[in-house]
Each structure stands twice: as C-alpha cells, then as structure tokens.
Image (cartoon, rainbow, N blue to C red):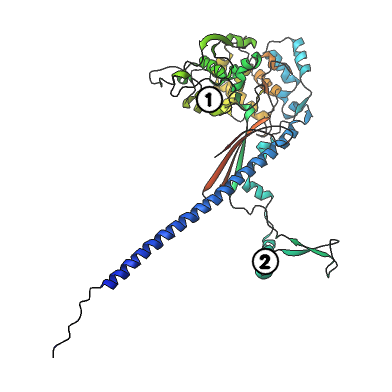
Amino acid sequence: MKRPRRKTEHGVALLMVVAAIAILTAVAVDFSYHSRVEARLATNARDELRAYYLARSAVQISRLVLHFQRQVDQVQIPNLSGILGGLGGSTAMGNVAVATGQTSASTTQVAAGTPKSSSLHLRLWDIIPVDSGTLQLFMGAPPAADLAAAASLGDGGLNLPKLRSVPGLGPKAAGGSSSRLESPARPFGDFDGTFHSDVTDEESKINVNALNQLSTQAAATATEMLALMHWRDQKYDFLFDDNADSDPQHHQVHREDLLSNLHDWIDTDTNTTAFNPLQMAIFSDPFVAGYGDEDEFYQRQEPRYHAKNAPLDTIDELYLVHGINDRFMKAFGSRLTVYSSPNALLNVNTNDSQQQLTNILVALDTNRFPEAPLQLMGNPLLLQTILSELQMLRSFAFIGISVQSFVAVLAANQLPVRPELTVANSPHAFLGDTSQTFKIEASGEVGDVQSRITAVIRYDDNLGKLLYWKEE
C-alpha cells in the first residue's frame, strides 16, 4: 500500500515566534533600563534639592550663631586680660615699655592708657558645631513608644490626622470640650541626609584691598604682606625670583614688585607705581606714582585685558594680577582675603601658626631694630617659646586674647615691639582682637549627592550682611 505524501514543513512559524520573543525581550530590557535610569535621575534630582536646602539650613544656623557672637563681642568685662593671664595686666605693659626702650614716665603713661575693660573674646562659632549629627544629640527624637503611637494614628494605622480636645474652643463635644485637627507628631531630625558648616574668621587674614587705603593702613598692609611672604627669609625666594623655567607669559616677580602690581590693579589711575619700603617705617604711603602703563603686561596676554582699577571682589581675581600664580596661591592664598572692611584691624586671634608668625613679625619694631626679624627666625627655640606662651594664654581654642596680651608676650621675651601697639587706641594701630566678617562653608549631603554653599557675612542688626554667595 502506498503511503500518502506529507507536505514539506519549513518551521516558519517557529522562526516567527523566536523572532518575536527576541524583539520583545530587547524592548523589555530597553524599557527596564530606561525606567531605572529615569528613576535614578528622579532620585538624584530629589536628593539634590534636599542637599541644597540642607546646606542652606547650615548657612542659616551659622548666621544665627554669628548674630549671638556680635552680642557677646559687645559685652565688656573689667580687667579680663588679668583674669585670663598675668601677661595682660599692668605688669606686662611695663615689660612692653622696657622692651620698646621707653622711660619709667612713659611706662606709667602706657599703663594708664590700657583699657580697664575688655571684650569677652569668646568665639561662639568655635564652640557651637553646626552639624546635623551634633544637633540631633541635643534635639533628638522622642522615645520609641511615642513614635510607635504616632505611626498608628487614624484608622487601620494609616497615619491619618486625629482629633484633639481643646477646652473652651468652638462647640462642645460630648466630653465638654471642642475638637480640632492635629497633625501627626513628627520627631526633629527625621530628614534624610546630613549637613555641616565651617566658619572662618576673615579678619584674621590680610585684606589685599587695603593696599589702596590711606597711608597708615596701606603701610600696615604692605608690612603684613611682606611678613607673610618672608621678606627677610630665603624660604620662599623660589616663588619670586625669575628663572629659565618660568612661564614667559606669567613670569615670577619680586615681592616688592608684586605689591606694586596689586596696588596698580586696585587703584583708579592707569599709571604704574613703585614701592618704597622705607616709607613703611614712618607709616607713610609706600607706593610712589610712576609714569608707565600699568596695562602693558595685560595687553600682551591672550586674550587681552585691563587692570580692574577697583577693589577686588573675590579671591579668584588675584590670578589675573601679574605675578600671582598657582604656586603663590598654594603658599599664601588661604591667608589672604578681600571681604573684610579695608579699615578693619588684623585680628591676632588665629589658629593658623603661619598667620600667627606673620602677626609676630609685623609687631616687631623694625624701624629701630631692622635685624629683629632675622634674630627671631634664626632662633627656633625662641619662636617656639613665644608660640607656646600665646597658646597658653588661650586656655581654650574658643577664647581669644587681647592685643595688649599679645604684645606683652613679645615684650616679655625681649623682642622690640612697635611703639604704636603699646598705646591704647593708637591711630596707627593695625592689630585687633575682634572680628566682624566671617566666611561660612556649608555642605548638605543626601545619598550620593552633595551640595556646597560658600557665603561671607558681616555683622549687622539682623543675621548679617551678605557679601558673597556661591553654590556648587
């Protein structure tokens, strides 16, 4: 018997099913990938917003601390220097007079000119940490039993608003009191993320804009700048001496020329100035007018630009000044500022040992004793003794010292002190012990996202005048 002939089977349907499955799989994988990406982007956007406002919260809390700091600075304490350390009293001022070569009569005058009251010198911004973790320790959540009760409000544990009895308000309920809606109790600090803030005293740094002030302030600032750059020390000579490896477009300049370039950048004219260091000894303007074009170097750059002929607004602008480069800013940039008032006195209370050394150098009487800085720098033991005594006067890091106490430490170690620093309220004084301008560096972090805000605040009647704001 002949078998029936079967039709040829090519498997087209199977191929179509496999192809369809492959296409659907690719579409599903792509859809899943994009869904995860979109979800991640949405999460990051949410966390970025949260981190930004956490950083803003840190800034505002820091401004509140500085608001109270202003009130503390206005509190006058009688004879505080004598309480915090014996070097701040009349005996120490007598040592100042001896070290400066004054007679006994002048010693009495100096002691009499010493103020009988002093600021508290308590630095709240050093005491109070603006940090979410620390704040949660003081403003923590309620006990776990209360949290469990708050989470089960309403029907079926849906966390709905509940009714709370308020006596004497509205129509009375069955219990003799009215009812109103109350939001569920929420503990402080239940937000996602953290924040932190650091406060820096801007008036413990040298204000570059003061180089264009009146002669007394300009001379004092030039002295501070030269001391910061170790004018009579070879430690930083490599930053200011020309050499074959220098960038021909931004070649290094000498210290005195750098001060002239900074003055030319800030002043209002277009002529160059020369620097006369002899004028600093008598507190006269050390910058002498010249006849050259201050824009000559800047017009040879690419792109060309002009000197600003106005005060600097930010520290980053210093990079535009002839002679300032990355190496200079790495060495000295953290000790320079443009935000404090040009007439503000340099605060002697600083935790920076390099800046403290600068304060010591500018306090020495180099007019009558030009070799004093070299003698100090050449005697590491003496320098360490002075720094230790200053640190000992500040029993705690958050308690400052007065200018009189600072000067008295130098005099007690037989160092010549500038006469204008030994007389209370001297018009030529350039050192102070209180500050009004501060930098706030705040950060907020949620998940993998971090937001940073930098603000500069100066005291006023509210939460401080905002001088600078930068978001990152």
Q: Splitting the image into 4 quarters, where does residue 467 fall?
A: top right
**Front residue of 119 and 438:** 438
Residue 130 locus on image (x, y percent): 64, 42
Q: Amino acid at mark 1?
A: Leu
- Residue placed furthest toward the bottom: 1
Residue 316 locus on image (x, y percent): 53, 29
300 on left or right of 464: left
**Front residue of 51 and 121:** 51
**Residue highlighted by disc 2:** 152
**Front residue of 109 and 249:** 249
**Residue highlighted by disc 1:** 318
Query: Local crowd at mark 2 within 10 Å, few (<14), some, or many (≥20)?
Result: some
Q: CA distance from mark 1 to mark 2?
A: 60 Å
- Asked if disc 1 and disc 2 are in contact, CB closer than 8 Å, the reply is no
Q: Amino acid at mark 2?
A: Ser
Please say if 95 is above or below 337.
above
Regarding mark 2 in the picture, which secondary structure is present there? loop
Q: Splitting the image into 4 quarters, where does residue 351 fall?
A: top right
Please say if 116 is above or below 174.
above
